[in-house]
Structures are given as structure tokens and as C-alpha cells.
Image (cartoon, rainbow, N blue to C red):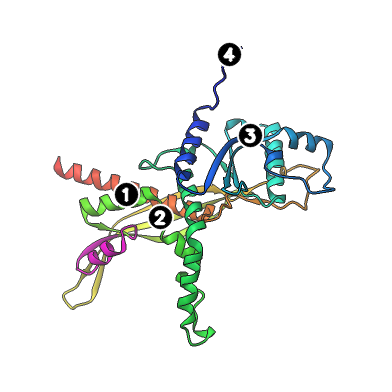
Amino acid sequence: MKKRKLFNTSEYKTVSELREALEGTDYYIHPEMQIKNVIELEINEKISKKDRRAFNNATFDFVVYNNNSIPEFVIEFDGPCHSEPKKRQADYRKNIWCSLADLPILRIDDSFIAKYEKTTFLKFIVDRFVSWRTKSETIIREIEERVSFAESISDVDYGDPWNDPSVVFDLTHRFPASVEIATRLFENHKIVSNYLDDKTYHSATNNYPWVEFRRDRMGGGPIGDYARRVERTYKLERIYKKSNGKIGVEKIHELTTVVDYKWGAPTCGRYDINRNLEIPTVIFQGIPGTSVSELSDHFCDYLALDKLEKVTKKCLATIKD
């Protein structure tokens, strides 16, 4: 007999990221936990012998639970082997069980634990989950108080993003890597973006001229049954005041970023003749405090800011040469 390695490299990185994100909170991580200890079958709930055997033997890679020992969501790490038919069938079962138990499931791969300016999207997701749990009620209450000052319901603009708690939360919980790059772009090149803090942004845009980097166009669409593509175009512009007092805008640079993401976790194979039509597609990454569409927007912004910084450095290097 000999000792066995507890985690492979990806699993170890995942555990480390989760422990760092949850340290000092009311939430905890349990790796490799048997499904039967996380999900309980209802009385008289019938499943096939094959499914029951799988239910009793299968495990979740990671379980995040609260201080009352109630699971909040589970994380499955999908490596290359998850494309194999047997593994896909096991994944379908887990998706079904999570759907029936109303337990969010987050399926990740190595891209979620890759470092972007010393942070990862897995940690970003978990940080947002914890923040949403602690701050959402305050955000909702502040919106309700502000809306209460309206003379009538017809005076309330429910289309205003600042009246949507999820939008307010998203705008105030940015991807840290984007904030770091935006800060450098301003400090080194005086380029303004909405990733700067409010005070710096308003101070910089109160004096003409200034150079601003902003999102210009949005596009995208489905790419298969459970995936979507988002495309974002950005412009770097110089905003100045003309001699006649009017505002002028000069385009300096334009770039586009594209991100593909999975919006759903299927509960059956595409050509599965035994598919259970009563089980809907599981909303992928339905973790409180974030959504996959929000993540894709944040990643598009990050890629755009990263591209802009590289272009700026290259231009400066050319000028110096």
C-alpha cells in the first residue's frame, strides 16, 4: 500500500481559490462529498435501480454550505474526459438531481481558475455570492425608499437600471482585474473609463479635453443548444470643446471582443430516446449574486481593457524607438 495524492493540480487550485474566497465568511467548502449526503430523496420518491445505485455512489466535486450546514451550491470540475458518453450520462444525472432539489450547480473548467491580474473568475463568482447574501437586502431597501418618494406609481421608471437591484449590484461589483487595468490606464495615460471610481471619473470628465474608453455596440447570439456568443465593440475617443462652445468627439481607436459561454446544463443527451421531458434545462451558473451573462460582459470588458493597454504600450514603444 502507498499514500494517494488527494487532489490533482486543477482540483488543488480550485480548493485554494474557494477557501480564500470563503475565509472569514459564514460559508464553507467541502470537497468530494457523496451526493446522498447533500440531496435527500423524498418519501415515496421512486427512481430506477440504476439511478439509485448511481445516486448512492456518486459524489459532488465541491459543496459550498452555510453555517447551518445547508448546501448553497455545488461545483463540478469538467475536465476533457467529460466529453465521453458515460461521463456525460453521469453529468446529466447530477444536473437532474440538482434541478429537482433546487440546488444550483456550477460547472467549471481550467478557464475559471486561470489568473487575470492575480484573480480568477471562480473567486469572483464566490465573492459576489457572499456579497449578494450580505448586501442585497440593503440595496433593495434603498431602492424601495427612493421609489417611495414618487408621487404616484406612474412616476416610477421601472426601466431605469438604478431601480433594478441586480443591475445596481452588478455595477458596484466589478471584475477586479478590469479595475486594476483601468486604474493603470488612467494613471499612466489619462485614459478614462467607467471602471474608475466615481470621484476620479467625474473629476477627469469635468475638464476638457479628456480621452475616454467605452463600450459602443453589443451583439451576439446562440451557438448551439446550450451556448451563446456575445460580441462587444469599444471606442477610444477624445472629447473636446470646439471654438464655438459645442462638444466635439474624435475617434482614436476601436476594438472588438468576443466571449462564448454555456448558458445551460442539459439534463439529457441531444439524441437520448429516453429523455425525461419533465426535467428542464438547468440554468448554468445560477449562483445568487451573478449570472453567466453578467460574467461574459465582465470578461469582454476585461479583454477589451487588456487589448487597449497592450496597444497603448506598443504605440508608446514605437514613439520611443
Earlier along the polypeptide chain: callout 2 or callout 3?
3
Residue with the most extreme bottom position? 151
Which mark, residue 180? 1
Looking at the rendered image, the quarter that the C terminus falls into is: top left
Residue 247 sits above or below residue 175 on the image: below
Q: Position of residue 38 (x, y in %)?
A: 67, 42
In the image, the segment drawn in magenta is 194-212
135 left or right of 307 in image: right
Quadrant (top left, top right, bottom left, bottom right) of the N terminus: top right
Under circle 1, the secondary element is: helix
**From mark 1 to mark 3, how far is it between C-alphas?**
36 Å
Q: Amino acid at mark 2?
A: Arg
Q: Label 2 belongs to which residue?
A: 174
Q: Give how far apart the Cα atoms at labels 2 and 1 are.
A: 10 Å
Q: Position of residue 2 (x, y in %)?
A: 58, 13
Task: Work out whether residue 201 or residue 97 is closer to the camera in this orientation and state it.
Answer: 97
Q: Is residue 209 magenta?
A: yes
> Residue tagged by mark 4?
2
Give the alpha-carbon distance from disc 2 to disc 3, as whole Å: 33 Å
Identify the residue at horizontal 55%, vertical 40% (top origin).
Answer: 29
